[in-house]
């Protein structure tokens, strides 16, 4: 992969990393505000509990994506970005444009997903 392509993906990954960190901070703030609320009835409590579950799920998913992005940024630094973790072949540029923090090429992604189930 050429230097200009690496810079392109590094910029995308760093921007997404910053956005996720901002989102996680916002989720944490919202969860703290929910805990500070005085809940007057069961409906209020149910609504706050539901919001808390949703926020926790979103935060967990974003934390996972953040981990994958940080791993991709480390690969850029180590000059092995864009190489499949499973087969060690190049991950296609089009796939990286869709998911810049992809760990696997298309074929290996399908294998990994089958193994996760």
Image (tube, rainbow, N blue to C red):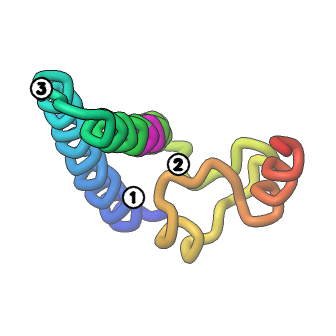
Q: Which residue is mark 1?
A: 6
Q: Position of residue 28 (x, y in %)?
A: 22, 30
Instruction: Report if residue 66 is visible in the image.
Output: no
Q: Nearer the viewer, mark 1 or mark 3?
A: 3
Tag 3's secondary structure? loop
Instruction: Measure the alpha-carbon separation of dots 2 and 3.
Output: 49 Å
Does 58 appear in magenta? yes
The image quarter containing residue 21 is top left
Q: Which residue is mark 2?
A: 81
Of labels 2 and 3, the one closer to you: 3
- The quadrant of the rendering that contains the C terminus is top right
What is the residue that sits farthest to the bottom in this orientation?
94
- The local secondary structure at tag 2 comes to loop
- The mark tally for this picture is 3
In the picture shown, does residue 23 fall above or below 70?
below
User: Are discs 2 and 1 less than 8 Å apart at CB?
Assistant: yes
Q: Position of residue 66 (x, y in %)?
A: 39, 39
Cα distance in 3D space between marks 2 and 1: 8 Å
The residue where tag 3 is placed is 38
Q: Is residue 85 magenta?
A: no
Q: Residue at x 11, y 23 (%)?
A: 36
């Amino acid at each position: 992969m050429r230097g200009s392509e690496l810079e392109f993906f590094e910029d995308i990954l760093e921007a997404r990393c910053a956005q996720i960190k901002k989102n996680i901070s916002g989720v944490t703030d919202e969860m703290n505000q929910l805990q500070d609320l005085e809940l007057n009835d069961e409906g209020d409590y149910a609504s706050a509990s539901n919001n808390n579950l949703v926020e926790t799920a979103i935060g967990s998913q974003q934390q996972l994506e953040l981990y994958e992005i940080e791993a991709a940024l480390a690969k850029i630094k180590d000059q092995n970005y864009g190489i499949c973790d499973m087969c060690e072949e190049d991950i296609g540029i089009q796939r990286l444009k869709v998911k810049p923090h992809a760990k696997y090429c298309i074929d290996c992604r399908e294998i990994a997903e089958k193994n996760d189930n």
